[in-house]
Amino acid sequence: MSVNTPRRDEEGSVDDMMADEPDLAPTDDQSLSVDRAMRQQNEDDQATVTGVDGEEVEEQPAAASPIALTPIAPSTIANRYRELVEAEHDVTTSEDGSTDGVLRSAASPLESFPTLSGDSPSVQGSVVSSPGSSNILPSLALRPGLRGPTPSFRPFDRRFSSFGSPGTLSPRPSSPAFLAGHSRTLSVTSNLLLDSSETEASSPPWEVVRWTKLLKLDGLAFSESGRRNFGSPTCLAVSASIVLGTSKGVILVFDFNQNLKMIIGPGTKAVESGAVISLAISADHTTIAGGHANGSIFTWDTTRPSRPFLSIPHLPQLQPRSTDGHVPNTAITHLGFLGTRHTALVSADDRGMAFSHLATRGTGSLGRTVKTTRILGRYPDAPPPVGKTLKPSTVLAFQALPLGNVEVATDSMGLTAMLTPYLLVIVSTTPVAQTQHKCARPKEMTAHSAMTGCLAWFPAVRLKVPDPLTGSIVSKVKLVYCWSNVLTILEVEEEPAENKDKPPTLRFRPRNRWKCEEPIVAVQWLSRSVLTVLTITQRLIVLEDRTMRMTEAFDLIHKHIYHADLFSKQLHALVEQFDDEDPTMHGVVADAFYMSFKAYKGRLFLLGFTDVSLGALSNWADRLIALMESGDYVGAIRLATSYYTGDANKLTVGLPEDTALRHSMVIDKLMEIMGASLKHAFGQRTRHREGGDDKHLRELAQTCFIASHNAGKTDFLFDEMYEWYEEAGLEGIFLETLEPYIIDGSITAIPPAVVKALVTHFVSNGLETRLEDIICHMDTSTLDLDQVTTLCKTHGLYDALIYVWNQALNDYLTPFIDLLALLVPLMHNGDADSPVSVLENETRETNALKIFPYLSFILTGKTYPTGETIPDVIAQKAKAEIYWFLFSGKSISWPKGSSKRLLTQPGQSQEPSFPYLRMILNFDAPSFLSMLNEAFEDSFLNDSPEKQLAGGPGCDLPEEEMFGLTVDRQYITSILMEIMSPADFSTEDTIYLDMFVARNLPKYPQYLLFTGSTLTKVLLGLCRYPGDDLAEDAQLSAEYLLSVYHPPDLPDLIPRFKEAGFYRILKRIYKADKEYGKLTLTYFEDPNEREAIFDCIELCLRPHSGLTRRQVQDVHQVIKSHAGKLVQIDPVRAAQAIGTYAPELHSHILGSVSEQPYLQYTYLKTTLEPSTEVLNVRPNQQDLVEQYLQLMCRFEPSHVPEYVNKVQATNLRLEKLLPTMEETGVIDAAVILMAKEGQVREAMARLTRHLKTLESALHGLLTGTASPSQADLNPQESAEELVQALQNYTRVGVWLCQEQTKATRESGHARQRHKSNSKDELSPDEQLWLSLIESCVQITKRATSALQPPPPDDSTQAQLMNGESHHSSESVLVSLDTEKLITLVRSLVQSTFTALLSSTSTRTARSAADTDDIQPSAINTNLSFLRVLRTFLTRAAASSPNLADLRSVLSSIFAAYAYEESILGLSNRLLERSLFVSVSQAVQLRQRGWRPKGSTCEACGRRVWGPGVAGNVYEAWEDRQAAEESQRQARKQLTMSGDKAAGAHTERGKGKDYVWPGTDGPQGREKYYGNTNGDEKGKGKGKAVSPRLKQQDESTNDPNQQANASGHEGMQGPMVAKREQKLGPLVVLACRHIYHQACLDALEMKHEGAVSKGDEFGTKREYRCPIDR
C-alpha cells in the first residue's frame, strides 16, 4: 500500500494523507440523500487536524456524524423492510448474524474511513434482530391520503412515507422501546419486540457514543487459532491501519475493511524479545514501532515488513555500561515517534526510565547507528544522591506531541510529556534534551485513592472560525493529564526568542481542573473541544473542554476492556509503606488501560480481552433521526428545541457555539420535524379513531408551541398546526394550549378565525372569566372589532369589551355608559310588577359592579383590567370625559350629537341634578367613595400649569374635555356633601362621606377648604357610626381630622367621644390638658389597650414627671378604685409598677383581690422575689412576707424551704406561720424556721414526728392497711414517693444537726465540754444526732421487716386450708420491687452515719493546720462520733436484747465506711501531706511513662517496637491486659470478703514506686512490671500475690503453654540474640535504654554470675543498666 508523506502547502495545511486508501463502498443514493440533507451545514464547521498519532483528521466542532463507520442495520420496523432486505441477494448473512462483504452505508461529512465489513450495529445491553429473522412490530403507521411531502420536508417525512417505494432502508438501527432509559427525552409510544438471537448488541443510536464490534477482525485476532499462532492481543494503535501487538511478540496490521494486511515479526528477533507491550505509528503511517517485554525496540517499514527497519536492543547484561539504553528485562511500556521522522523515537520502561533514540541516516538497518539519550530516571546501580531518599518510581503515562495542520515552533522541539507517581515532566528532545516544565501532583487528590496516571496531547490546528475567546485562528497546543481522580488541562504558549535561530520560550499555563468521583485510568481527545475519560470502574465520561461539563457518562464494564498490571511490581515497596497519616500516598496501584483506549479521527477504539470495538459520537442530526425512527416525535421536537436554544450539550453533538450559526443549522430541521410529527400523529388518529385517547396530541401541541415560541415561528402555529387540530375537531386542545402564551404576552396577534373559535370554545365550556383574561392580553390592532364586540356583548364579556373599546378606539366613555346602563333597571326593579327575574338581576349587578374598578383604573391612568400605564395624552382625555360625565350636573345625549338622552329615571318627566352621580351613589356609595379616594391621589386634580394651559380659551377642545379639566377636589367634595344629605341618604352611606372628608383634608389642605361648622358636623357624624365594624375606621378618620382641625367647642365633644369609644382621642386630649387622673381612668376603660395602663402609671408617677401632689393623688385614687382590674390585667407588671412607683398601695392592691389568692401569690412573688439575692425584710414588709409564705405553702410548697433560708426571719411570727406550714405539709420549712428562731430541739422533735408519720404511711402501704385513696394508686410509685420523702426529710435533719454542730464548734463549747464534762455525757448537738439516728434506724427496721415478711405460721396456714380469706401484705409485695425499696430505705442510715462521721471527724484545732508540726496525735481528737455510736448501741441493746435485730443496721453503718466518698476523703486527710504529694507525683510520672532512646534492644540489636518489629506484640499485650484485669477483679473480691490475711498480702507497701526522683543518669534503676508471657505479675516492691493468684500465675508460666518464658539461657554474648525466636518482655531503664528482659538477664548472668530475683512471689525485679556501670 503506497502512502503519501505529509506535505505542507503555503498556507500551512496538510495534504490529504488518505489519498491512497480504499474508497468508500458504493452507496445507496436514496439512503445517502437522507443524511446529506441533515449534515450539509455541519461540514462548514469542521477543521482538518492531525490526529494524536500523527494522522490528519477532520476536526468537528463537537462531533460529526460517524455514519461512514456505521453499516446499514435492520430497522425496528422490520415488517416494512424485510422483503427488500432479503431481496439483496448479493449480501449473505454469516452464522453470527453479521454480513460479509462491503455493506452500503450512508454518507458522512467525514469520509476518511471505508465501511467496515462484518460489523453490525448493537444496543447496549440488548440486541437488534438480523434481516430475515425479525418479528418486531412496526412503530410508525401509514398515513394514506395525506399530502405529499415537499422537498424541504422530505428528510424527515420519508420515515413516514408508504412502504412500497424502493430504497427506503433506514440507514441506522432503530430505537427499541425498552431502552428508554438511555434517552433523556424518550417518550416512545409503541411497544417493540426484539429477537436477540443472531445480532451482536451495541448502544442505541441516540447515545453519545455508538459502539460497533469489528467481528471480522475479532475472528482473526481473538480466535483460538489466532491466539495459538500469534498470541493474545496486548496493545492497540490506530492510524491509517488498526495495529495490534500480541503476547508472542507479533504485530498484526489490519485495514479498515478488517482485512489482515500484514503479520510483522515472525522469524525475527522480535518474537524472541517477549510480548509487545507498546506500539507507535509514524506520522506518515509507513513505520510501526514495537516495544517488547525484555527492553528491546524494533521499527518496521510496512512496505518491507520481513525484517526490522531499525533495532534498538537493551543494554548487554553483566557488562559495564558505556552507553545509555534500557536495562535488560524491563518492559517498554511507552513508545512514540518524534515529528515526521522515522528514525527519531522516545520510549519509557516500567523502571521509571525514559530515553530518546536518534538513528543516523544510512542504507538499511546495518548502515544505521542509534544514539540513545536518557531523559528521565536513574539506573538501578547508580549511587543515590547525597542527602536524598530515592522513592520507587515508574512512568505512568507518556506521549510525544503529534503534529497539527499548522506549522508551529513546537513541531521541531520534540516535546514529550511524562507522568510519574510524583511529577509531570515535559522535555524537549531536539536539539538537545531539556526540561521545559515540571509540576507536582495536585493536592486535591482524594486521600488513599488508587494510583493512576494518564495524559494526552492535542496539537495546534488552524481554525476556520476564529476562537470566540482569543480571536485567534490557530488553537493552542493542549495537554490533558490526570493523577488519580484529578484532571488538569495545560495550555502551551509560545514566546518567540530574540534570536530567530534559537527556539522560542514556552509557557505552560494550567487552564482548567476537574475532579472526578473515581480515579481516571485513560484519557483521549475526541476532538478539539471534547474529551473522553475512562475511569477505574470502566465508566466512559464525555467532557467539554472549556466548561469542563460532563455531558454524558455510562458504563463500559460489559466491554471487558483489556488491562494489565504493569506498575505494581515497581511500586510495591511504596505501597507497602502506606501510611494512614499521609493523605498523599495511595493504597493500591491500578492496572494500565492506556494501551487499550485510543482515539482517532473522532472515533474511539477499545481493545477488549475478546474483541475490538469502535465507537463514534452521534451528532445532533443522528439523534433527531433516531428519535423519529423510534416514534418519539415529541422527544425529537424537544431535543431539537434544546439544540436551537443552546440548552443541550452543543459541542458534544456537533453544534457550534455561535448562536446565529446554530440557529441557521437547526431551524429548518425543527420545522420539518414538527410538520412530520403533526402529519403522522393525525394520520394515526384517522386510522385508529376508536382509541379515543388524545393525550398524546395535547402533549404534541404543548411541545410544538414551546418550539415555535423559542424559534420565533409563531406563524407555523396558525398556518399549519391549527388546521390539523381544526380538521380533527380538536381545536380545543390547540386553544387551551395557546392560552398561557397569550396571558404572558408571548403571542398577541391571532387570526380572526382563531379568535372566533377561541370565544366559542371557552364560552361553551363555561370559561368566560378565562376568556376575558385572554382577550385583555391580546393586541387589539389585529382583531376584528365588530366580531369581537359582538361576541363580547352576546356573552356578557364586559371586561373584554371594555378592553377592546379602550385599546382599539381609545374610547373610555362608551364602556362606562354601557356599564351605567345596567344600573337603570337595577335601581327600578324593586317594584312588585317588575318582570325581571332574580337571576337576571344578579347577573346585571355582577357586571354593574365592574364600574368601580373601571373608574379606579381610568382615573389613575391605568389600563383596565391589565393595569398597564395609559399614555399621558390619552389618560388626560379619558379622565376629563369621565369627570365631565359625572359632575356636569345634567343629563347627556350619547353618542355625541344624537338626540337620545341617557335617563336615570325613565318613568319621570324630570331628571334630578347630577343624575348619574346620584344613581351610582344610590347603588353603592361606599365603593364609589373608595374609588374616588384613590382618584384623589392622581395629579390630574391638581391645579397644574399644564392643565390650565390645556383648558385655556385658546385651545380647541371639546366641551366635555374642557369641563373635565376644570374639575378639582374642592368641587367634587362640595358636590358630594350637597348630594349626600342626611335627608336623602342613610347613616350607613353618609358615614363613608364623613370618613372621606376627614381623611382627605389632612392630605390636601391646600386644595380643600371647609367651615368649622361643616367639620364639626363631620366629627359628630363620625361619632354616630352605624356598626361596631366601622368603629376603628371612624376613630382613625376623626384622628386624621383633628390633626388639622381644632374645634373651639372641644369640651362639648368629649361626651360624644366617650359615647363613641374614641379612647385614643380622649387620651390625647387629657394628656394635652394634663388631666392625669382622667387619663389613667381612660386607660382603664379602653378595652383594646389594657396593658398600656402600666405605661401610663410609669408616665404619671415616675420621678421628675412634673406632676403636682394633687395630680398624683388623683392618679392614686384611680388606681385604688380599679386595683382589682389592674392585677387581673397582669399581676407581674402590676407588682413591678406599684412596687416601683407607689409601694404604699401594696396592701390596698392585695385587699382588692382577696378572693383570688393565686393573683395575690403572683403579685407578692414579684414584689418580694424580684432577684436571687438575700432579701432584707423591712418591718413594714413583715405582713407581706408572712402572707407570701402562707400563699406559697398552698401554691408552691417546694419553694418554701429555699425562701425561708434566704429571708431574714427575725421579725416573722411563728405562731402565725407554723399552723399553715403544718396544714400544707411543708414540715421542712417549719423546721428551718424554728431552727433560725433558736428552737432547735423543738424543730428536731417536729421533724422526727413527721418522719414517723411518713413511716406509718409506708408501713400501711406495705402491709395492705393503707387508706382507699392510696390503695387505688400504683403501689410501686407510691412506695417510692414515700421513701423519697423520707430521704428528703432525713437530709433536712442532717442539715439541722450539721448547722448545730458547726455553731457549737464555732462558739467553743465543744472544747469546754471536753475539759469539764464526763466523756459519757452527750452535748446538745450530739443529742440531735442521736435523735435523728434513732429515728432513721427505727424506720429502717420496720420498713425492712415489712418488705421481708416472715413465712406464715400455723394459724395462717390453717386459715388458708379452711378457705378463709386472709388479708396480708403478700398481695401488695408481689407488685413491688422490694430489692430497690430495701436499698433506698437502708440508705437513710448510711447517709446519716456518713454525715455524722464527716461532721465530727474534722480537725478541732485550727492551729494544726497553721503549724508546721504535723503529729498523728493532732489529727482528729474529736470523739463525738464514737460517743454517739456507743450511746446508740447502748440504747439499742437495752431495747433489743437480741443483737441480730441490729445486724442490718450495723451492716449499713459499715457499708457507709466502705463506699461513701466522704469516708474516702476522710482517709485522705489522715495521710501525711508529704506522702500524698509523693504518691501523686509518682502516679503522674507512671501514667506518663518513659520513652526509650531507640527502637532496638541495646544488647541484641533487634527491633523491639515500632514499624518492622517481629512477633505477635499486639497479641501479647492483649494477653497481659487480660491477665492484669483478672488480678484486679480477684483483689476486689478479696477486699469485699474482708479477708484479713488476703488483705495483708494485697496491701500496697511503701516500697519503691515506678519512677524515683533523681534516678536519671548513669546509675538509673528501673523495675520491670508485668510479663507478656505471664512469668511476672504485679507492681511495686514487696507486693505479694494471694495464693489463688500465685497458683494462677504458675499455671500461666507452664513451659508447655508459654514460649520462651525463661529468656535466652546460655547466651554467649549479644549476638546470640539474633536467632529467630519469640522474645519476651521489655525493660526500660531510667537512662532510657531498652532491653529484652532475656537479654538483660543474660548480661547480668555474664557479669555478675547470677540474675537478681524479686520477692517470693516474683512481683518485682530490679535492674541496673550494663552500659552505665
Image: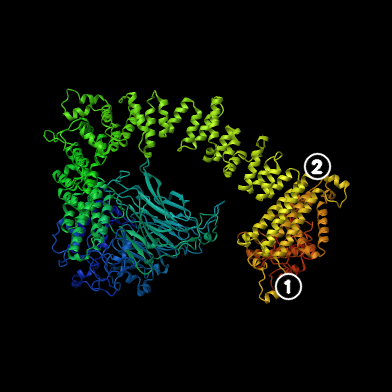
Going from the N terminus, do you reach mark 2 or mark 1 first?
Answer: 2
Give the quarter of the figure containing the N terminus: bottom left
Front-lying residue, 374 or 1248: 1248
Circle 1 residue: 1353
Q: Which corner quadrant of the image does residue 145 belong to?
A: bottom left
Q: Which-is-in-front pick, marks 2 and 1?
A: 1
Inspect the image, locate mark 1, and give the three-letter code of the amino acid beneath it.
Asp
Q: Residues within 10 Å of mark 1 (few under 14, many from 20)?
A: few
What is the x, y in percent for residue 1456? Answer: 74, 57
Is residue 161 visible in this depiction of the protein? Answer: yes
Above or below, 560 against 877 in this view is: below
Q: Is residue 1558 visible?
A: no
Residue in view at x 24 percent, y 44 percent: 845
Per the image, label 2 sits on a secondary structure element best described as helix
Left or right: residue 1017 versus residue 1119 is left
**Quarter containing the C terminus:** bottom right
Using the numbered discs, state the Cα–Cα distance from disc 2 to disc 1 in whole angstroms: 57 Å
Q: How many marks?
A: 2
Residue 529: where, in percent of width, then height? 33, 52
Name the residue tied to disc 2: 1307
Q: Nearer the viewer, residue 295 or 1649?
A: 1649
**Relative to 1459, is 647 on the left or the right?**
left
**Residue 662 at x, y = what percent?**
25, 50
Crowdedness near tag 2: few (<14), some (14–19) or many (≥20) residues, C-alpha within 10 Å: few
Disc 1 is placed on an element classified as loop
User: Identity of the amino acid at label 2?
Assistant: Ser
| Residue at the extreme front | 832
